[in-house]
């Protein structure tokens, strides 16, 4: 059986004699169904892999090591705050998705539909550009000599074909990303063990606790927007946390077990009918609440160990490598300070090579290519999943199609557009709107903190709403992201970099 | 004792050695250097990883928990790295050389072992789960 949740759905999704429902907002009420048992251990290593694949990217491998070389390791307290905040956001995203089987986009629509349309438009504006492919493909070009546009276009087509042929897209991608992330983590640890020193590690870790450290240069028009961008890129950036709710649902976590999985285009005919809303469990039943606690334990383990731990590991390792390189070749700092991203990445690779032999330079570029591949696989799937979910439920007439058809439609649209832009256009987006895109991406993070507060406190039954401390942290998140963004905009006239 | 339980952990350990040695070969290091790196790091990690799998299967370490795995590697990973350092110096220079600051070296490796433990557990669970899923239908057929 390719869908382990099928039994749960067929056994428990049929309505009981007298339908009980949970009314949330003005949209269709959620019928009460049984909450499946939580997994006993970490064996269901599932949806966090997507968040790690998307989250462990340029922020960890490039932006933060770069800031450490420029301002010293003490600047990393901002990274600690950023990633810890993201771990809490992840837990809160999971709260709604596991309790209802609905995405956070659906939750936003329950509060006020235009909020959901805002995210629909932001996703189209920000994520349709294939710029995220360029760093990984350029790194691959340095290692293999294959022109980066060729590998990027071939990669795009392969992703489309792979996702279209898959029986259940989630299963394929989870397996693939799990191996890639596992290799990345194990390799990062091995390389850091061979190259770094005790002093590098201690200064990197101690730097994370130097709360309030802010050198004068960091508050300049040149560097403050870079720091804001780096904070936004600490862990998952933009809308990536929102897409995590869709992966949780497809993994069958919590009430997501009652929702069918999205299939590849070739197997779209086998997809079960998608319910028009999610489900709620009986929060007045102590046995059900016990199971809920099990699910919360499971996702907390995922958030703290897998998401927080791996993000920290990768960025600490890269920072240790950057410090080792800087020790051996002091000119690396000037190279990185002056260069654009590709130039700086090549500079870091050269510095690593001079510090630890050509192996280390190639390892660094290999990691960048691997990170680029992970992000590309994750982004294309997530974008298509999110847009398909919103379109299916809220675009009039879209239910004539299956969710899998809509998914494939968005996927091939973004791939086709991506190829056209890679060959003939500006990969990151037109220069005139780059600032707008960067603004929207960071603004979305502050906005989803507000949405989380509204959705979890107004759309969920009282027994499973977040505690006060959690609300305070998420509220501070909104202030943190929006405050930094607007301060940078008003004080320096620059959004983020 | 089921030796098959040692396969996932040994595979992850060996893979780490292959990554280290393979990359060395890829960028033009002498083949002997790459081979020594691969074996000197991969074999100790594979032995320890396999042993960990057996301990979990026999119930001596709880399965699916992170803390016991992290503690195991807190000791095991620095040991494997020490074996690696000594073996490489022995093969390449003919002399046994310990790292200059042994205590600092071991402490550093101990800290890095936490990251290694996360990656190890991640891959181990993937491979072990797949092996169990594949073995289950075979076992069911045999018992019939």
Image: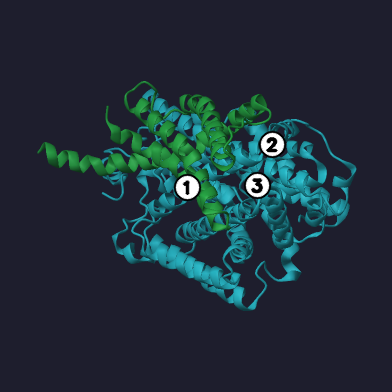
Chain colours: A cyan, B green
- Residue B13 in view here: yes
- Residue A102 in view here: no
Return the x and y of residue A294 as percentages of the image width and height: 43, 28
Q: Residue at x 64, y 61 (%)?
A: A135
In the image, residue A465 sits, relative to residue A326, either above or below, namely: above
Say which of A169 and A75 sits in front: A75
Left or right, A220 with respect to A136, comes to: right
Which residue is labeled 2 in the image? Answer: A80
Left or right, A260 with respect to A317, comes to: left
User: Does label 3 lie on the same chain as label 1?
Assistant: no
In which quarter of the view is residue A127 placed?
bottom right
Say which of A166 and B109 sits in front: B109
> The C terminus of chain A is located in which quarter?
bottom right
Mark 3 neighbour density, 10 Å: few (under 14) some (14–19) many (20 or more): many
Mark 2 neighbour density, 10 Å: few (under 14) some (14–19) many (20 or more): many
Q: Residue at x 72, y 53 (%)?
A: A351
Which residue is labeled 3 in the image? Answer: A60
Which residue is labeled 1 in the image? Answer: B18
Q: Secondary structure at mark 1?
A: helix
Return the x and y of residue A255 as percentages of the image width and height: 40, 40
Q: Secondary structure at mark 2?
A: helix
Q: Residue furthest top?
A: B60
Q: Residue at x 60, y 31 (%)?
A: B109
Left or right, B6 with respect to A125, comes to: left
Chain letter of the residue beneath label 1 in the structure image: B
In the image, residue A294 sits, relative to residue A394, either above or below, namely: above
Q: CA distance from mark 2 to mark 1?
A: 33 Å
């Amino acid at each position: 059986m390719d869908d382990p949740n099928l039994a749960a759905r067929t056994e428990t999704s049929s309505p009981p004699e007298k339908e009980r429902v949970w009314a949330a907002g003005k949209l269709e009420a959620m019928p009460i169904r049984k909450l499946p048992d939580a997994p006993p251990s970490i064996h269901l290593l599932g949806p966090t892999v997507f968040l790690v694949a998307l989250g462990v990217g340029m922020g960890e491998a490039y932006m933060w090591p770069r800031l450490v070389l420029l301002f010293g390791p003490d600047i990393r307290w901002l990274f600690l705050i950023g990633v810890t905040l993201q771990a809490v956001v992840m837990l809160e995203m999971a709260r709604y998705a596991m309790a209802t089987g609905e995405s956070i986009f659906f939750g936003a629509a329950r509060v006020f539909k235009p909020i959901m349309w805002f995210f629909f438009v932001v996703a189209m504006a920000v994520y349709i550009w294939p710029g995220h492919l360029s760093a990984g493909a350029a790194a691959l070009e340095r290692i293999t000599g294959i022109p980066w546009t060729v590998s990027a276009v071939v990669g795009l087509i392969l992703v489309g074909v792979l996702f279209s042929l898959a029986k259940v897209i989630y299963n394929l991608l989870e397996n693939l990303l799990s191996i890639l992330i596992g290799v990345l983590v194990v390799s990062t640890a091995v390389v850091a063990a061979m190259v770094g020193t005790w002093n590098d590690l201690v200064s990197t870790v101690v730097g994370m606790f130097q709360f309030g450290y802010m050198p004068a240069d960091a508050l300049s028009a040149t560097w403050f927007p870079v720091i804001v961008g780096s904070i936004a890129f600490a862990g998952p950036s933009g809308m990536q946390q929102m897409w995590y709710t869709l992966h949780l649902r497809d993994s069958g976590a919590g009430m997501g077990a009652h929702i069918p999985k999205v299939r590849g285009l070739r197997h779209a005919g086998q997809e079960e009918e998608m319910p028009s809303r999610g489900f709620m469990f009986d929060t007045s039943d102590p046995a059900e609440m016990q199971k809920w606690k099990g699910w919360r334990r499971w996702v907390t383990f995922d958030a703290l160990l897998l998401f927080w731990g791996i993000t920290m590991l990768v960025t600490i390792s890269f920072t240790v490598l950057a410090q080792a390189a800087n020790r051996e070749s002091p000119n690396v700092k000037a190279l990185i300070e002056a260069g654009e991203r590709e130039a700086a990445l090549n500079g870091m690779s050269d510095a690593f090579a001079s510090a630890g032999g050509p192996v280390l330079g190639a390892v660094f570029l290999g990691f960048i290519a691997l990170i680029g591949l992970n992000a590309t696989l994750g982004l294309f799937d997530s974008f298509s999943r999110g847009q398909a979910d919103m379109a299916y439920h809220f675009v009039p007439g879209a239910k004539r199609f299956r969710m899998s058809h809509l998914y494939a439609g968005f996927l091939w649209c973004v791939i086709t557009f991506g190829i056209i832009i890679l060959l003939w256009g500006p990969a990151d987006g037109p220069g005139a709107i780059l600032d707008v895109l960067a603004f929207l991406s960071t603004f979305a993070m502050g906005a989803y903190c507000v949405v989380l507060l509204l959705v979890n406190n107004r759309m969920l039954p009282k027994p499973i709403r977040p505690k006060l401390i959690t609300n305070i942290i998420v509220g501070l998140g909104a202030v943190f992201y929006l405050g930094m963004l607007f301060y940078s905009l008003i004080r320096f006239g620059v959004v983020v970099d | 004792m089921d030796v098959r339980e040692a396969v996932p952990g040994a595979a992850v350990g060996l893979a780490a050695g292959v990554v280290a040695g393979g990359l060395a070969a890829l960028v033009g290091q002498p083949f002997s250097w790459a081979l020594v790196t691969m074996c000197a790091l991969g074999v100790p990690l594979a032995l320890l990883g396999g042993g960990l799998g057996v301990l979990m299967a026999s119930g001596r370490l709880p399965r699916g928990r992170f803390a016991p795995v992290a503690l195991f590697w807190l000791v095991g990973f620095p040991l494997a790295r020490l074996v690696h350092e000594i073996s490489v110096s022995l093969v390449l220079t003919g002399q046994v050389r310990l790292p200059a600051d042994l205590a600092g070296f071991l402490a550093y490796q101990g800290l890095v072992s936490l990251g290694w433990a996360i990656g190890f557990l991640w891959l181990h669970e993937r491979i072990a789960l797949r092996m169990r899923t594949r073995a289950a239908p075979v076992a069911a057929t045999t018992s019939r």
